[in-house]
Image (spheres, helix red, strand yellow):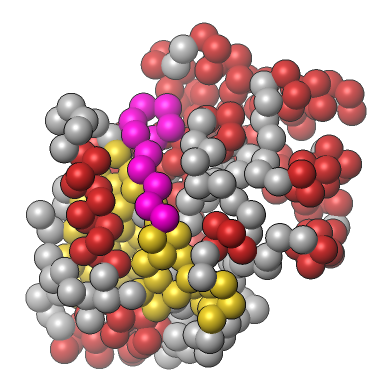
Amino acid sequence: MTIDILLATFNSERFLADQLDSILAQEDRDWRLLIRDGGSSDGTVPILEEYRRRNPDRIFLLPGGRASAKENFAALMAAADAELIMFCDHDDRWLPVKVGHSRAAFEKRAAKLPAGTPLLLFTDLLVADETLENVSGSFFRHEHIDPLRLELRELLLQNAASGCTMLFNRPLRELAQPVPPEAFMHDHWLMLTAACFGEIEPLSEPTLLYRQHGGNVFGASGYGAAYFCRKLSLGVREIRERLFRQCRQAGAFRDRFHDRLAPETLALLEDFARLPEAGFLERRRILCRHRIFKSGCLRNFGMFLIV
């Protein structure tokens, strides 16, 4: 079964060739690569054109234009038509087994589910520096993230999965489409959809080198004093705005699926969505009432301090 690999690029010339080479080196060869550029002003597009010229049966460039990463991936999701889909970031390096091992684990879980069940699999990552020297053998451990925290209330504030490790099927894509403007990120929206209407399968095996180079959209900062300082450096207003973006995402999710959600799920989403308008004490009551917490005491301490 062919997999559509979706790659969004933007000013990606620095690491792009390395990532493309790692995809072409996959042991599992049943895939095609769909690429959309978000308006690069560097040498990204010529690199893409050269790789497409050399691999016309595997690499396909979609018409692009100025777009955020979320908008770019949303457009790629809309264009994909394979039964299985993977996201791909432009600055990592995939291990040769990534496609094959993800597919095998996905098919093993899918075989136990009714046909047509929306299913999403995600994996661990190897954290690496700019030159791909090892920083940590596990992103989950490095960031103190529990990959088994997969209930909706646990995912509202913290996506346990990195989009670049995901493999998901057509039924989930069709449910999640279109990704709304209010979505925090395309992969977070997909996780919420899978948590409510499908199944999520975590795989503890790392499948790629997650390159940290200072320009990552989110990145891996580690968990501890450095993490806390990095968050504080954003400023209270920015931290609060990120949380409120997740609240707006919850409101959009409630509106999209209102008729399909259980009453308790609707109550959870409605309370979380109104967090920005709630008072100081009411915000904290909402989080505690629904047990909307992050992974790790330090994260929760910071959240309750700032929210």
Which residue shows up at 37% across the image and 86% down it? 18
Which residue shows up at 22% across the image and 75% down it? 26
Residue 144 among those drawn in magenta? no
Residue 199 among those drawn in magenta? yes
121 or 14: nearer the eye?
A: 121
185 or 121: nearer the eye?
A: 121
* Residue 58 at x, y percent in the picture: 15, 74
Image quadrant holding the N terminus, namely: bottom left
Q: Is residue 95 visible?
A: yes
> In the picture provided, is 204 more to the left or to the right than 79?
right
> In the picture provided, is 102 more to the left or to the right than 221?
left
Which residue shows up at 88% across the image and 41% down it? 305
* Residue 232 at x, y percent in the picture: 84, 59
170 or 143: nearer the eye?
A: 143
- Specify the segment rendered in magenta: 194-204
* Residue 172 at x, y percent in the picture: 30, 38
* Residue 247 at x, y percent in the picture: 65, 34
> In the picture provided, is 199 more to the left or to the right than 139?
left
Q: Is residue 178 above or below residue 217?
A: above
Image quadrant holding the C terminus, namely: top right
